[in-house]
Amino acid sequence: MSAGTETFLRLLQQQQQAAPTPMANIQRPYQVQGARGLVPAPMALRRPQPPSAMPTMPKLSPQMQAVANRVAMSKLTPRAGQVGLTGGAGAMPQPSAPTMPQGGGAPAATTFGQRFAQPQTQALLGAAIAGAEASGYQDRPVSLGQVLGRMGAGAMGGYQAAEDRIAAQKAAAQKSVIDRLLAEAQFAKATRPETTSLMRNLALAGIDPKSPEGQKIIRDALTKPGTTVDLGKQETQFAAEAAKAAFRRTDAVDKEISTMRTVENELSVIEKLLAGGAETGRIQNALVPIKQLLKEVNLLSDEEAERLGTAELLQRSIARIIPNMRVAGSGSTSDREMEMFQLAAPTFSRTAEGNRKIAKGMMQAIEFAKERRNLMDVYLQKNKNLLGFDEFANEKQGKVFETFDKNDPNALDAYQQAYEDGKIKVGDLVYNGINFVYVTKESVQ
């Protein structure tokens, strides 16, 4: 018999000998008064007999002996997660004690065969804690339903908290993995040298760039004619795009000038009437309807009737300006925009001098825009685009309203030079540092 089989049989015999011997209820017969003879004790048991000696094991065949050896060795070998006792060859394997996970793994197994941090365990613990708390001393009676309700709420709270914690841990783990992969990719991209298409093709063909064959291919590719970049083609495309942008700009300016033409005509009428002596103001605005009534009953003189006609023509021109100040295609005009137009345009309630300066200023701005549009054509015809046009136009035109500060000792010379250069002309408005004044013939002689 092999050593493994003998060890197995010896362990089995020791286990049977270590089993406690049951105590039998053994009582002697006893004498009862008035009875004939001895009365046997009730429920008397047979005296137990010691166990018989282990019978001699029959001799096994070689195949059965090998099976018995494997069975004995499997019982003596510790399982996964177990460690054997150090008490010698006959020590039985014992399960290892629960340990906390290493490296953030799952928690160790605990009560009810579950893990402590799992939602089911947390729900049971929450219910137990809530039940214990509700079962204590209360200043008022508490029903069983109330206790069960608190236990249910505690269980749900513990379960949900555990679920949230597990979800947060998984999300954090996933984010950590993603961040690590991104960092590795960025590091690899930063440290990986840029390769040309030629080098990639050599790698795909399995040719070492450092080999004589690879060096020859690289040398032939670098000296091959016809691989230069056509800069002339790129310049042609740039010029075409610049020309398109120039024409788009000129089209937009043409639309604005077309809208200004009606306003310009009415402003010219207003400026001429005011320069000829027409009167405006709040009083004149209030007297117009009265004069119209007197005109109807022939109570106005011819001179007053002529002044009334001039006032009516002035009102009509002023009324046509504001609607035409809106840019075509800009949508509906709000009340706020109409108020801003009225503040910017002449009105019959303003003074005659104020209306004249407003009209002249608007005409001067329109004329400035028209001259700038003409300069666009000149510049575009010469340069085929409008790149740098604004600097060119500012040098040619100057400003809409030139400024000559009367306190500047060189202002008079600058004023004369601007007139000679064509930047100002008689009738234009200029700013003298205090207010706007007209350019007169006397001032430029």
Image: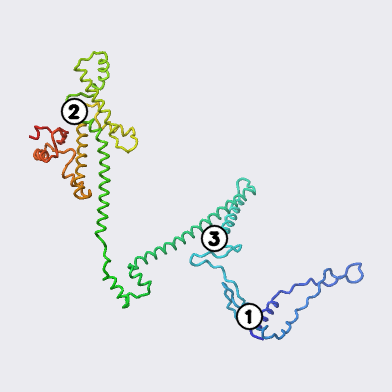
Label placed on residue 70: 1
Q: Which disc is residue 179 wearing?
A: none
Image quadrant holding the C terminus, namely top left
Q: Is residue 355 left or right of residue 18?
A: left
Q: Is residue 103 above or below residue 414?
A: below
Q: Residue at x 49, y 60 (%)?
A: 170
Position in image of residue 109 (x %, y %)? 57, 65
Residue 322 x %, y %? 28, 31
What coloring was used for the rendering? Answer: rainbow
Distance, label 1 to label 3, CA atoms, is: 40 Å
* Residue 399 drawn at (x, y percent): 18, 40
Look at the image and tell me in which quarter the N terminus lies.
Answer: bottom right
Q: Residue at x 60, y 46 (%)?
A: 139
Q: Which sits in the foreground, 195 or 13?
A: 195
Residue placed most toward the observer, 443 or 40: 443
Q: CA distance from mark 2 to mark 1?
A: 126 Å
**Quarter of the rendering containing residue 126:** bottom right
Tag 3 secondary structure:
loop
Seen at 84% across and 70% down, the residue is 41
Amino acid on which disc 1 is placed: Arg
Q: Nearer the viewer, mark 3 or mark 2?
A: 2
Camera-nearest residue between 218 and 9: 218
Q: What's the amino acid at mark 2?
A: Lys
Q: Provide the secondary structure element on which disc 2 rests.
A: helix
Please name the residue that numbered disc 2 is placed on: 272
Neighbour class for label 2 at 10 Å: few (<14), some, many (≥20)?
some
Per the model, the C-alpha gap separating discs 3 and 2 is 94 Å
Mark sitting earlier along the chain (2/1): 1
Identified at 63% across, 80% down, the residue is: 70
Q: Nearer the viewer, residue 277 or 256?
A: 256
Q: Residues within 10 Å of mark 1 (few under 14, many from 20)?
A: some
